[in-house]
Image: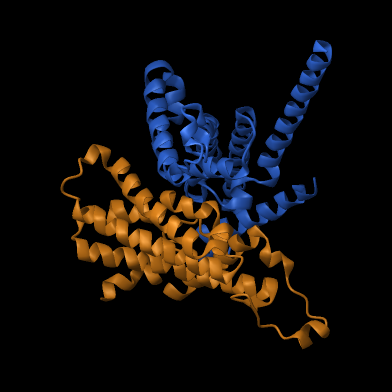
Chain colours: A blue, B orange
């Protein structure tokens, strides 16, 4: 009996891992934050003049997403959702605080970003030098809040799934901004109609990249 | 009056200042959600501009970002609840993008650049006009995407059946997300050509 139980546990564990990999790949390529949902476009367009800074910002976004989404997942699961407060008292079974989620998510994100900044400054000066200037910008980056809101909408079953989702979205964003910055560096040598230079061509390139990424849809 | 008209063309938040693109493009596959989104952003932008301008002398500069975020998220929650109560189908379509108005850079940008240093009434006007400038781009993009992508406008069919019978096809590409970006790119091109 117990053997069967253990086997069942192993099978379930394996399944969780496969689901995690699926969620991860899906969020990197198919549901790419930039190309499918246009999240974080403002900083994507503003900080993609060269590959090095673009990569730095990408790493910072990836890192903050991976930290904030699981935290917000736990808050959502144990505080905000309908019936989430049952662990306190049975009488809370019908309490639904999800209308507060917007304000709580943004407060958590702003708080964590502030905290990370202080921790980096104190213990990891090298990382602080690399990411430092980008961290304050990130509190108001829509990719971060978007990550938490999509997490809430998709109803992941465990915190590990939300972690896989956050890491995948972050890496997808990093991939998008690095690729775009690399293209933009080469753009200096291209002949573009005068009025289209700058932002105009940047949007069109992003659109074309997005069409390229749509090839993953069949996967 | 004339100084307030800038955001509609020459200082358009999306086309010229590249602000607030984030949540703008995903809602433009159809006209109706685009109009609702435009109105929501205008309301939030105007109201939070007014409130921040009213309390601008009492906010300590060090924590002003947090104060602004809280004021904006208050209005976004109000708009979100109103949409869910009155236009449930549209609010399902907009899904997380209503929530993302909080991090819309137009709103934060106007609070920082205008409301913190101006009197309440001009700030209110500035908020309304920037919201409308943003809405204008949304509506134009949504118009073309819905017309060519689905052959409808505001969910009413405008391309006659006889065209379809004669072999006319909807352009499926228009419905896909990347086309929104390409259309905005073309709009910027037009804007640049006109303003010089």
User: Is B169 on the left-hand or right-hand side of B2?
Assistant: right
Q: Is residue B21 above or below residue A99?
A: below
User: Is B42 on the left-hand or right-hand side of A62?
Assistant: left
The image shows residue B98 at horizontal and vertical percentages of: 48, 55
The image shows residue A127 at horizontal and vertical percentages of: 46, 23
Residue found farthest to the bottom: B162
| Residue B153 seen | yes
The quadrant of the rendering that contains the C terminus of chain B is bottom left
Residue found farthest to the front: A91
Tally of marks: 0
Residue found farthest to the top: A2
Residue found farthest to the left: B57
The image shows residue B158 at horizontal and vertical percentages of: 66, 83
State the residue in front, A206 or B92: B92
Q: Is residue B134 above or below residue A110?
A: below
Q: Residue at x 60, y 68 (%)?
A: B30
The quadrant of the rendering that contains the N terminus of chain B is bottom left
State the residue in front, B175 or A179: B175
| Residue A190 seen | no
Q: Residue at x 79, y 16 (%)?
A: A5
Q: Residue at x 47, y 61 (%)?
A: B85
The image shows residue B90 at horizontal and vertical percentages of: 55, 63
State the residue in front, B176 or A4: A4
């Amino acid at each position: 009996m117990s053997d069967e139980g253990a086997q069942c546990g192993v099978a379930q564990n394996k399944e969780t891992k496969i689901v995690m990999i699926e969620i991860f790949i899906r969020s990197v390529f198919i549901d790419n934050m930039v190309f499918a949902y246009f999240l974080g476009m403002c900083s994507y367009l503003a900080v993609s003049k060269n590959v090095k800074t673009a990569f730095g910002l990408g790493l910072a976004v990836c890192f903050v997403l991976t930290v904030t989404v699981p935290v917000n997942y736990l808050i959502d699961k144990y505080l905000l959702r309908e019936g989430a407060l049952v662990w306190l008292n049975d009488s809370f079974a019908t309490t639904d605080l999800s209308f507060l989620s917007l304000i709580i998510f943004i407060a958590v994100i702003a708080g964590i970003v502030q905290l990370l900044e202080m921790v980096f400054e104190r213990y990891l000066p090298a990382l602080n030098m690399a990411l430092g200037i980008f961290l304050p910008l990130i509190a108001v980056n829509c990719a971060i809040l978007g990550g938490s809101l999509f997490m809430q909408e998709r109803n992941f079953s465990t915190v590990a799934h939300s972690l896989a989702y956050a890491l995948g979205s972050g890496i997808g964003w990093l991939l998008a901004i690095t690729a775009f910055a690399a293209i933009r560096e080469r753009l200096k040598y291209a002949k573009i109609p005068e009025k289209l230079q700058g932002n105009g061509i940047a949007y069109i390139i992003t659109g074309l990249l997005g069409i390229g990424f749509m090839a993953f849809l069949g996967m | 009056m004339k100084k307030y008209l800038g955001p509609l063309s020459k200082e358009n938040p999306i086309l010229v200042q590249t602000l607030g693109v984030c949540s703008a493009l995903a809602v433009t596959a159809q006209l109706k959600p685009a109009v609702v989104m435009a109105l929501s952003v205008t309301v939030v932008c105007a109201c939070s501009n007014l409130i921040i301008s009213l309390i601008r002398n009492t906010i300590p500069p060090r924590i002003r970002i947090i104060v602004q975020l809280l004021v904006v998220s208050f209005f976004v929650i109000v708009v979100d609840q109103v949409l869910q109560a009155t236009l449930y189908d549209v609010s399902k379509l907009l899904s997380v993008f209503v929530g993302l108005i909080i991090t819309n850079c137009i709103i934060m940008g106007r609070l920082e650049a205008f409301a913190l240093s101006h009197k309440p009434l001009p700030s209110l006007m500035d908020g309304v006009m920037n919201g409308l400038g943003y809405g204008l781009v949304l509506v134009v993009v949504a118009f073309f995407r819905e017309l060519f992508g689905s052959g409808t406008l505001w969910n009413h069919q405008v391309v006659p059946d006889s065209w379809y019978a004669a072999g006319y096809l909807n352009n499926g590409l228009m419905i896909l997300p990347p086309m929104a970006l390409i259309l905005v790119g073309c709009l910027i091109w037009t804007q640049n050509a006109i303003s010089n």
